[in-house]
Image (cartoon, rainbow, N blue to C red):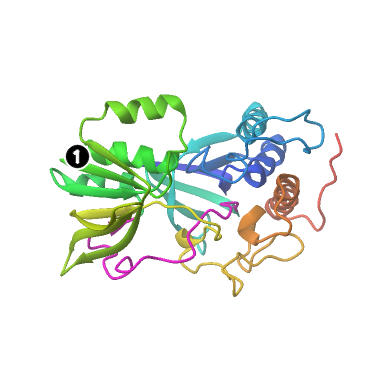
Amino acid sequence: MEEASYDVAIVGGGPAGLACAIYTARAKLRTVVLDRSPSGGSLARSSKIANYPGVKGPIPGAQLLDIMRDQALSFGCDYRKTAVVAVDLQTDPKSLYAADGVFRARAVVIATGARGRAEKIEGEEEFLGRGVGYCATCDAAFYQEKVVAVAGCDESAVEEALLVARFARHVYLVCPKSELAVPEPLLHELNKAPNVEVLLGTSPRRIIGEQFVSGLVVRTRGTGEQTISVDGVFMLLSGTAPVTDFLGGSVQLTPDGCVQVDCNQATNVPGVYAAGDVTCIHPRQAIIAAAEGVIAALQVDKFLRGASAVKPDYT
């Protein structure tokens, strides 16, 4: 497991996280962006963006993100495609535990967006840690020669399914939609995997078992419910809820599950900030998320310098 240290770690690579990274990296702060999926956020899924100031549109949201990411990288930002699964925000430096390493930083910015699920299916919490998981990178090796279901339709779900397929005898990729929202090269790789079976138009309904998971009840459009015998289930479906599960209650949330911040994007934990859809900003617009990311970046710079005021920068 890799261990790396930075001045600031930004969790999430959407407009809030990347705008923040542009400013912190340009301020000569050692910056890392930890992004689970470049194509998994709300902006990446937008087919046409025509109202982002300074960018002639319409362009796909993913292309706008590419521009932001390249700009952050040009200032020296480190970008890691990895999932943060737990944090310790009370230490100094703060610790972020990702699927492939531990990242330590003096300041943290939470910019994970709002693609999480608000509700769990029956049996999901009951069998958590006993066959139900959310990180295949962490747990795939436990399913050597077993049968596993991965529930999800986006790039992250497909990548996790392919990873599990290296160990499992058979993998079911369960997607409620009629098609997978993934780039063509990844779809080609999926089609070549001999032990991955894709179930489109199929929704997970219940996870069943006794001491451990033994099956997943699914409903397929036009055929009704059926039970798939599996040894494990990775739940990677997306929704519209703020993504905060990895925080483990380490920062204060609003009654709606959003990260609670003040006017400077600061949470209740010193040195920890949040920006973008994870704060439940309204309306949800890329430029507003980016603006929150910049505010967070300026506050991070102030915090790390021990300054009494934000340093203005218009150049």
Residue at 44% x, 26% y is 184
Query: What residue is shown at x 52% (from left), y 54% (from top)?
Result: 93
Tally the marks. 1
**Secondary structure state at the residue bearing disc 1:** loop
Magenta stretch holds residue 174? no
The amino acid at mark 1 is Phe
Secondary structure mostly taken by the magenta-highlighted segment of the chain: loop
Quarter of the image for residue 120 reads: bottom left
Residue 172: which quarter of the image?
top left
Above or below, 81 against 139 in this view is above
Q: Visible in this render: residue 271?
A: no
Residue behind mark 1: 167
Q: From the viewer's side, name the closer residue of 25 and 203.
A: 203
Question: Residue 115 magenta-drawn?
Answer: yes
| Along the line of sight, the residue nearer the viewer: 179 or 208 | 179
Residue 91 pos. (x, y %): 50, 61
What are the residue bounds of the magenta stretch?
Answer: 110-133
Residue 114 rendering spot, x and y as whole percentages: 57, 55
Q: Quadrant of residue 48?
A: top right
- Residue 162 spot, x, y in % from top left: 30, 36
Tell me which residue sits at (54%, 61%) in the image.
241
Q: Position of residue 314 (x, y in %)?
A: 86, 38
In this rendered view, identify the residue nearer to me: 37 or 311.
37
In the picture, measured across the screen, residue 21 lies left or right of residue 245, that is right
Residue 278 visible in the shown view: yes
